[in-house]
Image: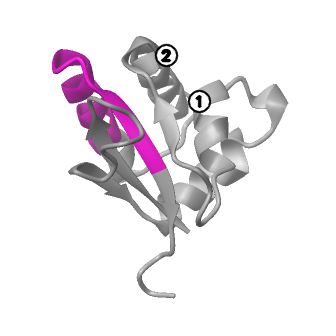
Amino acid sequence: MAFLVCYSQKPPDDHPNRRAIYLDQSFYEMIFSHCRSAESGYSIMRDIALLRYKSPTLVVPNTSLQSLNKELECLAEDGLKHLQISGFQVVVHAALNSESSLTITGDMYPEL
């Protein structure tokens, strides 16, 4: 399992017109093990972790991107390390600056 994250001006209708980042299987495994429970305190990351292949597109509106950024910071504070955390933060900042939302879909990992 992996995730395709795209910038969106008219979510979810324009997904995947402006691809932002492809989050790989190891990123999925990390957030699935750390964020999937309701008690984890990660509401947006939990929604992402619970996506499945062919799930409906998850929309993270621009108004929620600051919260997503904080959750990504908390992952690092919790001691989790993954190169794509910082890449995802860059995408979140770019979406905030362009007043875009993010659309996220589950994707089959290409090596499977």
Q: Residue 52, position in %: x, y? A: 64, 60
Question: Are the residues tagged 2 and 1 within 8 Å (C-beta)?
Answer: yes
| Circle 2: element type | helix
How crowded is the residue under tag 1: few (<14 C-alpha within 10 Å), some, or many (20+)? many
Give the number of the disc on residue 44.
1
| Residue 90 part of the magenta-drawn span | yes
Name which residue type carries label 1: Ile
Q: Residue 70, position in %: x, y? A: 47, 18
Picture residue at 34% right of the left edge, 48% below the top: 15
User: Which residue was labeled with disc 2?
Assistant: 67
Picture residue at 39% right of the left edge, 34% below the top: 11
Q: Residue furthest bottom?
A: 112
56 left or right, relative to 104: right
Q: Indicate the quadrant containing the N terminus: top left, top right, bottom left or bottom right.
A: bottom right
Separation (CA) of disc 2 from disc 1: 8 Å
Of callouts 2 and 1, the N-terminal one:
1
Q: Can residue 111 be seen in this snapshot?
A: yes
Q: Is residue 111 above or below residue 27?
A: below
| Circle 1: element type | helix
| Residue 92 part of the magenta-drawn span | yes
Picture residue at 41% right of the left edge, 14% below the top: 66
Magenta part of the protein: which range? 87-104
Picture residue at 59% right of the left edge, 64% below the top: 54
62 left or right, relative to 51: left
